[in-house]
Each structure stands twice: as C-alpha cells, then as structure tokens.
C-alpha cells in the first residue's frame, strides 16, 4: 500500500544530526598518526613510535565506535521526534483540512439545482463557486443560506482555533523534544489570529447579518489561509488538491498530483 507520508514534506524533520565534522576530524588525525607510525617505523625511537602508534590506534578505534553509536542514537531520536511531531500536529492538519473542505460541503448542500457531488475542485475553487452561486440567489434565499453558512462554518472555525491553542500551550514541552521552532511558532500564531478573526466575524454576523461584510471578510480570510497553507510544508498540497464534496483526503492520485505541483511552485 502506498504510504503518502513518504511524499509529503515535513516542516520539522530529523532535528537531531550527527556531528560529522568532529568525528571525521578525529578519524583523519588518528589515521595520519597511524600512517606516520607505519612509515617512520625504525627511523625514530621505538618508545616514541610505540606511544604514537598506540594513541593513534586507540583514538581511531574509539572514534569509530563512538560514531557508530552516535548514528544509532540520532536515528532513534529522530524516529521518536517524528512520532511526537505527527501526534501533536496531525490534529491541526485535520481541522484545517476540515475547514477548507467545508466550502465544498456548503456548495453541494446549498445549491441542489446542479449535482456537484461528482465535481472536483481545489478548496479555493469551491469557495469561489459557493460565493458566485450565492449571488445568483434571490434575497430571501440569500438570508437562509447566510444563516446556514454561519452555523456550519462556526463549528469548523472553533475547532481549528482550539487545536492551535492546544499546541501553543505545550510549546515548552515541544521545544524540549525539538519539534517546535521559530518558524513553527510563526505558522501557529498566523493560524491562531486568522481563525480568531473568523470566529469574531461569524459571531458579528449572527447579530448584524450583513451579507457584504461576510463575503468581504471571508475573501480576506481565505486569501490569508491560502498563504498560511503554503507556508506550512506538511499541508502545502492542500492548495492544489482537487476533491469531491465529503471526500477530502480520499483520492490518492489527486493527492500525489497536488504534492508534485506544490513542490514545484
């Protein structure tokens, strides 16, 4: 079975590295010592040559063993870091995916005069289609749809915001495990602000019910989220992924195509 994780880039991957410069330097110096003792054997005092030879051989052997152990330790630590990374950030990836796919669900439920179930679009195309079809409806239908949109979006926005805040609350533990850095903090802060703004706009919409304000705000929010998705390597392909309503993440061939295109742009 194809493992998509092998194709998707990870923002923080293999945070631990072997200090190759140190080990190579020790191996080279000790190797030179061994070579020197072999080439000049008999040309210098035997005791001095014996000391040089023993020291060089000892350093070389110790460095080689230490390097082997270090490689094994780093591999194991990176494996554990990868597991921690996925366990922490996968929930947020899911909720962002749920939010962007929400526009496809809204479209297929709101506009039943056309069967959108079999159509494939990127999330931003679904957003634009939902917006375009909205303005084709009469005033009474627009009011009904607006209430429906606000209710449906509110849950997704709230859950995404909660997921971001949960991660940020654990930032110090994540730093200790080397799965949180400055770039990751910036990414999370961007999402927290954007979904806080979306939640505020939806709450305001429940009171004022201003259609123009709604679409103006979500035009800006959608543009920002598109940029923030592009900034996070793990989900960059979301912007290119074409999917059918209620089937976000189910089409392997489309995901692979989206990953390829996201890596090129």
Image (cartoon, rainbow, N blue to C red):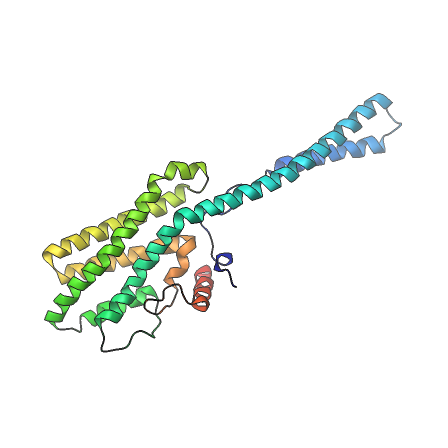
Q: Is residue 121 left or right of residue 130?
A: right
Determine the residue positioned at 28% across, 58% down: 222
Determine the residue positioned at 33% across, 39% down: 169
Determine the residue positioned at 24% across, 49% down: 196
Residue 4 makes an appearance in the image: yes
Q: Is residue 112 left or right of residue 86?
A: left
* 209 to 64, vertically: above or below: below
Residue 45 makes an appearance in the image: no
* Res 247 → quadrant: bottom left
Residue 109 position in % (x across, y down) = 24, 70
* Res 56 → quadrant: top right
Residue 131 position in % (x across, y down) = 22, 67
* Quadrant of the frame with the C terminus: bottom left
Residue 2 position in % (x across, y down) = 51, 63
* 51 to 176, vertically: above or below: above
Q: Is residue 194 left or right of residue 30?
A: left
**Is residue 167 or residue 43 the one in the foreground?**
167
* Res 258 → quadrant: bottom left
**Is residue 223 or residue 192 the one in the foreground?**
192
Residue 14 position in % (x across, y down) = 52, 45
């Amino acid at each position: 079975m194809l493992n998509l994780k092998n194709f998707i880039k990870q923002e923080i991957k293999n945070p631990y590295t072997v200090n190759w410069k140190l080990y190579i330097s020790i191996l080279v110096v000790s190797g030179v010592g061994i070579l020197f003792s072999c080439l000049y054997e008999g040309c210098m005092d035997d005791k001095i040559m014996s000391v040089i030879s023993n020291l060089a051989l000892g350093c070389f052997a110790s460095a080689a063993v230490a390097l082997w152990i270090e490689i094994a330790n780093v591999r194991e630590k990176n494996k554990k870091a990868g597991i921690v990374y996925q366990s922490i950030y996968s929930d947020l990836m899911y909720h962002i995916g749920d939010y962007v796919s929400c526009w496809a669900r809204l479209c297929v439920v709101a506009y039943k005069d056309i069967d959108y179930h079999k159509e494939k679009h990127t999330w931003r195309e679904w957003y634009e289609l939902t917006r375009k079809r909205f303005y084709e409806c009469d005033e009474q239908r627009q009011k009904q749809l607006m209430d429906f949109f606000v209710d449906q979006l509110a849950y997704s926005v709230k859950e995404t915001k909660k997921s971001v805040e949960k991660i940020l609350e654990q930032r110090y533990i994540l730093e200790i495990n080397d799965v949180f850095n400055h770039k990751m903090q910036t990414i999370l802060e961007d999402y927290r602000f954007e979904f806080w703004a979306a939640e505020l706009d939806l709450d305001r919409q429940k009171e004022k019910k201003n259609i123009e304000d709604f679409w103006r705000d979500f035009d800006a929010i959608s543009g920002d989220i598109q940029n923030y998705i592009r900034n996070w390597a793990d989900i960059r392909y979301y912007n290119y992924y074409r999917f059918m309503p209620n089937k976000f993440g189910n089409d392997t061939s489309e995901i692979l195509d989206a990953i390829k295109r996201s890596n090129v742009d």
